[in-house]
Image (spheres, rainbow, N blue to C red):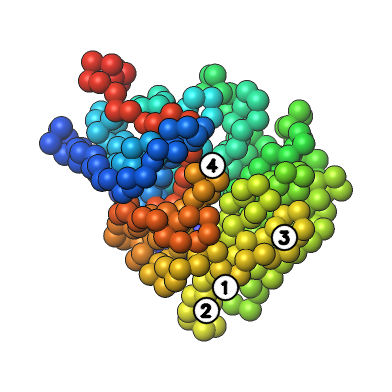
């Protein structure tokens, strides 16, 4: 629920409750060879990645794919086949995906839970109930999940959100910390959690703050005024936090800001639209898919900011013209070990999307069909393997 113009849809959203009744309802995974030049991948620390497809809100079509960089095989929709007894599969709207402590963590927004899987097989371990959960980060023995706390709907009186603290070993929520309105992404820097508060449900009265949580006490120790409708976050090598503002889709544009975590204040800003970003070394890759109700049109940009020099070093990191084929850029990830970056295309949001793989100089290497609204990447050091039937965990 990032670049979609979802504001008008939230109030009428319904979560579908259909589930499978027998094994014949399970759609098997599908393999497709997308690359034949994979010799270097066998020597690298990253062997592939999971890709979480959000699925359109209310459709209950969140799915999980895997790209095996050692074989060049892309496998679609692995979760249902691996976990045939899990009803409703991954649920409604996959909003984040991370690997930590040998587990794969999927934040499923409108189904109100975090799905925890084995990182090697994608086998279901448990679901952790968190209402309207959004993003996840980790520090030591705990995971931290942002939550809108209330129902999925526009409400000028929507309540404050919170961050849930989850024990990595117990897989239980052990504490919560109230933050701003409708908190989105959160990151860890120097013993503190930085939380981007959007206030998206309270439109046009957006929140404009970043909450700073001291990890030791798990309490908010500072609130930083940044800009309206905050969303994504990244931490650079020097500990600075980069945060995106989506603007208001009218006269206030999307922008990118930098927070100095020593003084907990905004120290720089860029007139760079930012709907999705990822950091690799000193390069911050930014997709700007910006909707305007004034012009009733989208404006799309692909830029790179050097986080050390604090300057835009690329105005278009897709160099071969492939950008004109991408209908709605949605996700971005970089594998610098393989010399590749990836862009996902959500298309029309209700049909399968597309994953594009580029060399770091911006030339297309391959593309492949995905699930609906491909969005979130999680790199792994060992390829996914389908568990043998006799090895499957009893549900």
- In this view of the protein, which residue sits in the foreground, 220 or 305? 305
Q: Residue at x 72, y 66 (%)?
A: 270
Seen as rendered, the residue at the extreme left is 24
Q: How far across and how far down the image is residue 292, in percent?
A: 53, 77
Q: How far across and how far down the image is residue 190, in percent?
A: 77, 36
- In this view of the protein, which residue sits in the foreground, 99 or 228? 99
Residue under label 2, please give it: 293
Numbered circle sitting on residue 337 = 4
Q: Pointer 2 and pointer 1: residues touching (CB < 8 Å)?
A: yes
Mark 2: few/some/many CA within 10 Å (<14, 14-19, 20+): few
Q: Determine whether the residue tagged by mark 1 lies in a helix, strand or loop.
A: loop
Q: Nearer the viewer, mark 1 or mark 3?
A: 3
- Say if 251 sits above or below 178 in the image: below
- Lower position in the chain sequence, tag 2 or tag 3: 3
Mark 3: few/some/many CA within 10 Å (<14, 14-19, 20+): many
Q: Pointer 4 and pointer 2: residues touching (CB < 8 Å)?
A: no
Mark 4 and mark 1: Cα distance apart in space: 37 Å
- Lower position in the chain sequence, tag 2 or tag 1: 1
Residue 258 appears in the picture as rendered: yes
- Say if 97 sits above or below 368 in the image: above
Q: Quadrant of residue 216?
A: top right
Q: Residue at x 66, y 42 (%)?
A: 187
């Amino acid at each position: 629920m990032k670049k979609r113009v979802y504001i008008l849809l939230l109030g009428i959203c319904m979560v579908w409750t259909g589930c499978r009744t027998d094994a014949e309802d399970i759609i098997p995974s599908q393999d497709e060879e997308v690359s034949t030049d994979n010799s270097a991948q066998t020597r690298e620390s990253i062997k592939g990645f999971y890709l979480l497809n959000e699925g359109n809100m209310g459709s209950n079509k969140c799915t999980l794919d895997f790209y095996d960089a050692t074989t060049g095989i892309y496998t679609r929709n692995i979760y249902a086949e691996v976990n045939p007894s899990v009803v409703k599969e991954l649920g409604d709207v996959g909003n984040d995906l991370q690997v930590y402590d040998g587990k794969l963590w999927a934040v499923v927004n409108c189904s109100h839970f975090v799905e925890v899987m084995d990182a090697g097989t994608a086998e279901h371990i448990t679901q952790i109930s968190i209402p309207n959960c959004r993003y996840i980060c980790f520090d030591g023995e705990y995971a931290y999940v942002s939550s809108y706390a209330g129902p999925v709907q526009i409400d000028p009186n929507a309540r404050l959100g919170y961050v849930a603290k989850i024990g990595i070993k117990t897989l239980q929520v052990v504490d919560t910390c109230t933050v701003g309105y409708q908190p989105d992404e959160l990151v860890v820097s120097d013993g503190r959690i930085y939380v981007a508060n959007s206030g998206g449900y309270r439109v046009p009265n957006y929140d404009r703050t970043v909450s700073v949580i001291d990890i030791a006490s798990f309490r908010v120790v500072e609130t930083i005024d940044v800009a309206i409708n905050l969303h994504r976050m990244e931490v650079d090598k020097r500990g600075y936090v980069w945060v995106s503002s989506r603007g208001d889709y009218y006269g206030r544009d999307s922008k990118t800001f930098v927070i100095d975590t020593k003084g907990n204040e905004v120290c720089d800003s860029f007139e760079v639209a930012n709907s999705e970003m990822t950091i690799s070394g000193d390069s911050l890759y930014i997709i700007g898919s910006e909707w305007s109700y004034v012009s009733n049109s989208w404006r799309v940009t692909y830029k790179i900011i050097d986080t050390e020099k604090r300057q835009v070093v690329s105005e278009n990191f897709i160099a071969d013209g492939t950008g004109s084929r991408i209908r709605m850029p949605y996700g971005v990830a970089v594998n610098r070990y393989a010399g590749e970056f990836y862009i996902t295309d959500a298309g029309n949001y209700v049909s399968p999307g597309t994953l594009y793989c580029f060399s770091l100089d911006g030339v297309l290497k391959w593309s492949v069909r995905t699930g609906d609204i491909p969005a979130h990447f999680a790199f792994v050091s060992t390829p996914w393997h389908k568990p043998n039937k006799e090895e499957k965990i009893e549900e």
